[in-house]
Amino acid sequence: MAPKRTTWLGLGALLVAGSALAFIAFGDLGKNLVYYWTPAEMLAAGSKAYGATIRLGGMVQKGSIAWDAGHTELSFRVANDATPSAPSVLVKVHETPPQMFREGIGVVVEGTFDRAQVFTSHRLMVNHSNEYRPPKPGDGDRWKDTLSQGTTSAERAK
Amino acid sequence: MRGTLGYAFVLGGLLCAVFGAVVGIVGGLRRRPGTRAWVERATLGFFVCMLGANLTMVWALIAHDFSVHYVSQVGSRTTPLVYTVVSLWSALEGSILFWGAILGTYLVAFLRAQRSSRERTVELGLGAMLGVATFFAFLIAGPANPFGPVFPVPPDGPGPNALLQNDILMVIHPPMLYCGYVGMTVPFGIAVAALLDGRLGEAWLNALRRWTLVAWTFLTVGLILGSWWAYRVLGWGGYWAWDPVENAAFLPWLTATAFLHSTMLQERRRVLKLWTLSLALASFSLTVLGTFMTRSGIFNSVHSFTQSDIGPTFLVFLALVVAVSIGLLAVRGPQLAPEDTLPGVASRETAILINNLLFSALTFTILLGTVFPLVREAFSGVRVSVGAPYFNRMAVPLGIAILFLMGVGPSLPWGNASRDVWRRQFLVPGMAGLAVLGACLVAGLRGWAPLTTFGLAAFVATVTLRQLFLPALVRMKEKGEKPWTSFARSAARSRRRTGGYLVHLAVVVVFVAIAASSAYVQHTTGTLAPGQTLSLSGYTVRFVGLEQGEEPHRHWVAARLDVTEVGGAHGSLAPRMNFYERSTDPVGSPAVSSGAFGDLYLTLLAFGPDATGSPTASFNMWTLPLVGWIWWSIPLFVIGALVAAWPRRRALPVVDTEPAPARRSAARGTA
C-alpha cells in the first residue's frame, strides 16, 4: 500500500472514530445532567422536571419534619425561603439525616420529582458552606447547641 | 511592617520576572551574546524574592500578625502550629503565593541542570518560563495580594477552613499537587523555546522529557494523595467523585502521560515532533485551566466569579497561553517535519500511537463533562452539573482499552513484527489473564467491567514482569551472576525502561484496586442504641457508647464501636464529629479499619439522647475491597519514576565487555 493512501485511510478512520466519540459523549452528557433548582424553579419547569435528576436546594420548612411509623422514612418540605408562603416541595428520604439537619437549615437533596408532587431523594446534604464566612455575633456558640441536643433525636422525641 | 516587607519582595519578584522574560526572549531570538548572564540573574532574583515573600508570610502567620490581610483571613491563635504554617496554602491568595515560590525553585533547578549548555534555547526557555512567572507575580501583586493591610487590626482570626485542618494529609497533599502543576511550566518553556528556535535536538528533547517526568511524578503522587485525603476526611465512603477540582488535576496528568509515551516515538523514529510538543503545551494549558477552574470560584456560579479580579485575570492568561501555543505550532510547525515513516500495524509504534489517541479521547470526554456546565450556564443561565455516571460510562471503557494496550504495546517489537511474535509473546500472558478470569468467575465475582479489568491486569502484569526480569534471566544464564546482581545490572543498563515498567506495575495495582473497590462496595446505614449491632459483608459492629473530648482548636464527640470480623479478629473504631469554635458546621472524621483485602469505613452521622434519654448514634457503614492499594501504590510509582529520571553520573564507564550475541538475546523483544 502506498504511504499516501495509508495516511488518508488513517485520517479517515480517525475522523470516524472522533465523531463517534463526540456523538456518544454528547448523547451521554444529555442523559446525565443534574439540574440545580430551587423549589420555585423546579415547579416552574413543569413536566420537564419529572424523572430528571435534580439537586434541589432550599430551606427545611418550619414544622414540616415528620417520620413514618416504622421510623424509616423521613419527610419534610423544602421551601425557597423562610417566609410561610414560599413555594415548597414535599421531600421523602430513606436515610439517616446528618447531625446538623433541623428546621430552618439550608439543605440540598438529590433525587427525582414525580407526578404525585413528591420529591424522592437518595441523598440529603446539609448546606455546608465550603467557603469560609466570618462568624457573625452570636454564631460562636451555635456549635454548642448542636452538641447539647442531638438534633435528629430531639426531633424524634417530639 | 511584615505586610510591607512581603509586598516589597513580591514587587521585586515581578520586576525580575518581567526583566528576565523580555531579555531572555528578545536576546535569545536576536542571538545577542552576553544576555544569558542577565537572564540567569533575573531568575535567581525571582527565586530569592518569592522565597522571601513566602518566608515573610509564614513569619506573619506564626507571629499572628493580623494586620496582614491573609493572616486575618486564615490565622487563629488557637490553631496548632503545624496547621498555622500549613494555612499558607489553605486559601486562595496564600496558595498563589506558595505557587510563586515553587515556580522560583523550579526555575533555579532548571538553570542549574542546564548550566553547562550554551544553546540559545536555554535562554529562550528561561524567558518563556519567566513570562509565566510574570503572570503569577502580577497576580500576587495585584488581584490576589495577600499582604494588603487590615485596619483596625482584629485581635484574632477565624483559622483555616475547618475541613482543611481536619487531617494531616493536608500538610503534604497540596504541595505535591502544586509541584506537579507548577512543574508543567518547565516543559512549557522548553517546548516554546524549541518552537522559537525551529528545531528540537536530542539534548533538548531529553530535557523536555525529564522535566515532564518530574512534574508528572509530583502530579501522580498529588492526585493519589488527594483522593486519599478525600477518603479520610470527607466521609462519603469514596475517594473520587469526578468533581471539577479532581478533574482539573487529572486532565494535565492524562496529556502528560500521553506525552511521556509519544516522546519514545520521537526518539526512535523522529516522527510526531509537532504532536509531542503539542502535548507538552496542552499539559501546561490544562494546568492553567485547572487552576482557573478551582481558584476562581467559577463553579459556585458563573456569575459570581467576576466579583473578584482573579477569575478574569486567569481567563486572559489562559487565552494568551493557548494563543501563543497554537500560533507557535502553526508558524514553526512545518520546520519540525518527520524524518521517518511509521512501520506496519503490528508494532510498538502503532501501539503507542493508539495509546496517544485513547489518552486524547479520555482527555476530551472529561474536559467536555467538566466544562459543559460552565458553558451551559453562561449561555442559557440554567445551572446544571454533569453526573458521575457520564464520566464513568466514558472513562471505564477507555481505561480498560488503555489497560489492554499496556499489555500489547510492550509485547510488540519496535518496527515490523515477525509472524510468530503473537505466539511467542502473547501465549503465556494471555493464559495468565484467562486463568485469573476463570478463578474470579469460580469465586463468584460478577460484572463485566471488574472481571475484564482483573483478567487484563493479570495479562499486563505477566507481560510487564517478563519485560522486567527477562534481561536479568538471560544475564544469569550467560554470566552465572546471582539473581539480584544480574537484575540490578540489567536494570542499570536500561533505567528508563526498567522505571517505566515499574510504573506500569503500579498502574496495574491502581486499576485492580479501583475496579474492586468501586464494583464490590457495600453500604448500610442505621441508628443504634448501646449494645445494638450493625452487620455488613463479614463485619459486625456493636455500639458501645459516646465519648467526648477537648483539643486546643476543637471539641469532639466520638461513637465507640467494637468491630468483629468473620475470622474472629477484634478491634475498636471511633468515628468522630469535630466542632470547631469558629465554624458553625461540625466536621466529621470517618473511622477506617484498613487491611490488605479491604477497608471497613464508618462515619458518625448523628448522635443524641432518644426519648428515654439513653444515647443513640446513627452510622453510615461501607466495606470497600482492596481500596487501600490505590494509595499504597505510591512508593512503586515514585521508585519507578526515580529509576527512570535520576540524573546519570557524569563519568559513566562506557567500556562494554559484553559479547555481542548475549546482548542481542537480552534485548530481543524487549527494549
Image (cartoon, rainbow, N blue to C red):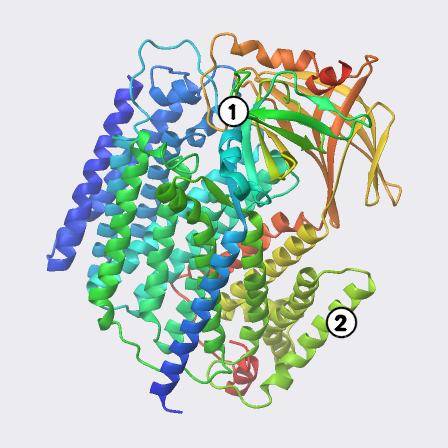
**In the rendered view of the protein, which quadrant contains the N terminus of chain A?**
bottom left
Q: Position of residue A16 (x, y in %)?
A: 44, 73
In what element is the residue under mark 2? Answer: helix
Foreground of the two, B135 or B641? B135
Report the chain holding disc 2.
B
- The answer to whether residue B654 shows anywhere in this view is no
The residue under label 2 is B435
The residue under label 1 is A80
The residue under label 2 is which amino acid type?
A: Ala
The residue under label 1 is which amino acid type?
A: Asn
In 3D space, how far apart are the residues under numbered discs 2 and 1 (Cα atoms)? Answer: 58 Å
Foreground of the two, B477 or B448? B448
**In the rendered view of the protein, which quadrant contains the C terminus of chain A?**
top right
Report the chain holding disc 1.
A
Foreground of the two, B202 or A76? A76
Residue at the spot x=75%, y=60% of the render? B446
Q: Would you call the spot at circle 2 few (<14 residues within 10 Å), some (14-19), or many (20 or more)?
A: some
Task: Give the image quarter of residue B114.
Answer: bottom left
Task: Give the image quarter of residue B608.
Answer: top right
Q: Position of residue A11 (x, y in %)?
A: 38, 76
